[in-house]
Image: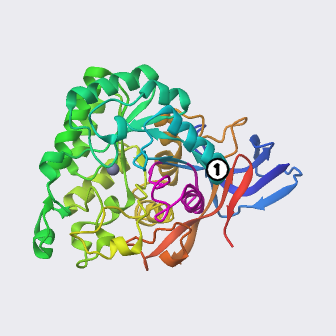
Amino acid sequence: MSLLIKGGRLIDPSTGRDGLFNVLVQDGKVAAILPQEESISADVVIDAAGCYVVPGLIDLHVHLREPGFEYKETIKTGSMAAARGGYTSICPMPNTKPVIDSPEMVRWLLDKAKEDAVINIWPVGAVTLGQQGKELADIAGMAKAGAVAISEDGKSVMDTKLYKEGMLEAKKAGITVMAHCEDKCLVGQGALNAGPVADRLGVAGIGNDVEDIITARDILLSKSTGCKLHLCHCSTKDSVAMVQAAKADGLCVSAEVCPHHFTLTQDDIPGDDANYKMNPPLRAKADRDALVEGLSEGIMEAISTDHAPHHADEKARGIAKAPFGIVGSETALALTMTYLVHTGKLTPYAMVERMSSRPAQIIGIDRGSLAEGKIADIAIIDPDREYVIDSSDFASLGKNTPFNGYKVRGKAIMTIVGGEIVYEER
Ligand SMILES: [Zn+2]
């Protein structure tokens, strides 16, 4: 079975290619990258004129909710949502029920994904057993079973000594530590960014220091252990400064930013609407601007979604009581294109770096590249497709987004995994 993707603009930072090429896929792999004028026959020909042809997007941070919370999302629906967003690979966080905290659970997830998922699933194991922060999980065993990283996402391991031991284990196993930075003692009942909006709505605030203190700690621990550290969903201006300093210091530190943090601020919260409640929260304008600049300059190397589906009833409880999180798989690309690419803050090439090639390197997987011989995980993106985000149309079971009704420009129109078309715009 062969597939020819014709007439598109191939953007592939792994090879430095950015231009008009035809891409031939054969037996699930990239068989040839041909000059546009060179025609070749194939079983299926896809007209990609006017579109970007890029290595499939890679999301380092999603919540699939299975096992344990299948009413919010399943491996199947979460993977379908990601495919619609142009993603061919996703990393589900381990905070399910039970927690992904053993080689057996990692294997269970991979087996289940093989049956149910339409894209590649790269497991992330917990740092501690049951994410209880008391005892280290079998990190070496999970890495051997296929975990590409460990994370306590949803919280931080507050016991610094234990965390350091976990980092050393991760280093030995050759996997990345993904850090959710939040000082548990400091956050209290915080629901929104500390400031006038939280005050007006009568909810407790989450200061930047809640995140920054643990970010600083984790960077220092990465320095003393030498482990690969990836900072999840950075939301503050000081996190950008710290990542910049860590890199200048030669540390193996990378960081991701989520679309809601580079598009919205606390001032966009219209009232008691829990679709604006996520962790970390929407911050001040100075923070948002620093994140955009960090992404532009390549200090912040990855864009991830922190896709966090919840049931509508849970989100209807209001900001004080609703769980944290919003969905992102089906809006991330459009928001990135609309707010960063079409505004000139990020080139299309840099976007592909942030959303595919760098994420692949951060977790050390052989993806994020359309070099000849690589597995054909591909997204075809129409950069000029304008549409209005309609959450009722999501493949995700979660409809919890603050972006419903937003007019955006840029859309994945086809997603190909291992040479198979898994999503095609109707
Ligand atoms: Zn998190």
The percent coordinates of residue 228 (x first, y second) are 38, 29
Q: Which colour scheme is used?
A: rainbow
Q: Is residue 64 above or below residue 254?
A: below
Say which element carries label 1.
strand
Q: Is residue 81 magenta?
A: yes
- In the image, 18: left or right of 324? right
Q: In this view, does 193 lie to the left or right of 154?
A: left
The reply, left or right, for residue 269 in relation to residue 77 is left
Q: Quadrant of the C terminus?
A: bottom right
Q: Which residue is drawn at 42% across and 46% down?
A: 302
Instruction: Assess whether residue 195 is covered by the magenta stretch.
Output: no
Which one is nearer the viewer's eye here, 158 or 305? 158
Reply above or below: 228 against 153: above
Note whether residue 245 is visible.
yes
Residue at position x 87%, y 52% in the image: 42
Is 382 in front, or is 134?
A: 134
- What segment is highlighted magenta in the picture? 60-89
Evaluate whether residue 390 shows in this view: no
**Which residue in the protein does label 1 denote?**
19
User: Could you say where residue 398 lies in the image, as x and y percent from the top left?
Assistant: 46, 68
Q: Which amino acid does label 1 sit on?
A: Gly
Question: In this orientation, which residue lies closer to the viewer: 29 or 164?
Answer: 164
